[in-house]
Image: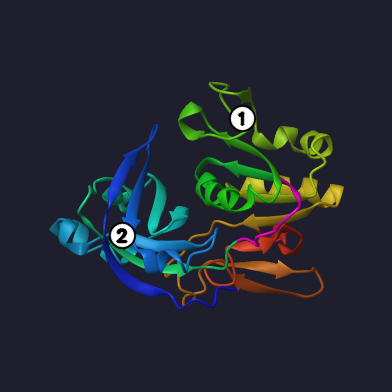
Amino acid sequence: MNNTHPQRLERAVYSREELCGDYFILWIWDEALSKQIKPGQFFEIRAHASLTDAEDSRCLPKLFKPISVYDNSGGRIGFFIKKVGPGTIALSKLKAGDMLELIGPLGNGFPLITQRRILLVSGGIGYPPLWYLQKELINHNLIFWVHGGAGQGDVFPCDEVWTVDGSLGKKGLVTQSLKSLITEKKIDLVFSCGPMPMLKQTAAITSELGIEHYTSLEAYMACGIGVCHGCAVPIGSENAWDYLRVCKEGPVFKAEEVLWNML
């Protein structure tokens, strides 16, 4: 669980980076904040109220968006974002010097482990938190990373790419190769983040093979700070379970403890 008290902050955009398709990265600079963040944590962020027009301003409370930390090094903090709705479109209009409103760091984050054979599995916008994670793990573990997307505009650097339309890498779903890949690479630990169907299938495979698996869940968050319980998911066993909040007790859970059939 995250023991760091979330902060509400205003920070200037240090720089922005354009990626393929609808993706972009916003960078901020805060050395003190940087030291508090762990791989897998996220922030609620939005464009500062002063940068929105009058119509947008009426909707501002709904425009905070949960965004995972993509990179964090020596004060340089990156948010890897896809334009999918009003909140992220507002963020996409920001340029260096514009102000961001942030709440965080939020959530628990991934465990940092050494001397393991690790498989990273991501899909679409599930890529960013695993990028930060692999930077922290790569010097102390053997890592192989598979990533999938709808098309070539949804995939990014990794070891094996899958696209649904076959426009880049292998054609199909990223989960198609997992069972054989885990066996071939002698994988003993899996980290995953991405769309729910991908996570469910990955969890089913790791359960069948008896492989340790940590997964970062995505959920609708009305508040992002544990107050509204809108992001609660069933965690535990079929005989003893409870609803835990993705934003507070998560977003990272042991896959074996998620009651996937109830999601």
What's the magenta region? 110-118
Where is residue 100 shown, x and y percent of the image?
27, 60
Element assignment for label 2? strand
Q: Residue at x 45, y 30 (%)?
A: 153
The circle on residue 162 is: 1
Residue placed under numbered mark 2 in the picture:
46
Q: Earlier in the sequence, mark 1 or mark 2?
A: 2
Quadrant of the image for the C terminus?
bottom right
Q: Amino acid at mark 2?
A: Arg
Q: CA distance from mark 1 to mark 2?
A: 31 Å
Where is residue 250 shown, x and y percent of the image?
59, 66
Does 9 sit above or below residue 192? Answer: below
The circle on residue 126 is: none
- Find residue 158 and report its image quarter: top right
Q: Amino acid at mark 1?
A: Trp
Residue 63 visible, this orientation: no
Residue 12 visible, this orientation: yes
Q: Residue at x 65, y 55 (%)?
A: 215
Residue 38 left/right relative to 88: right
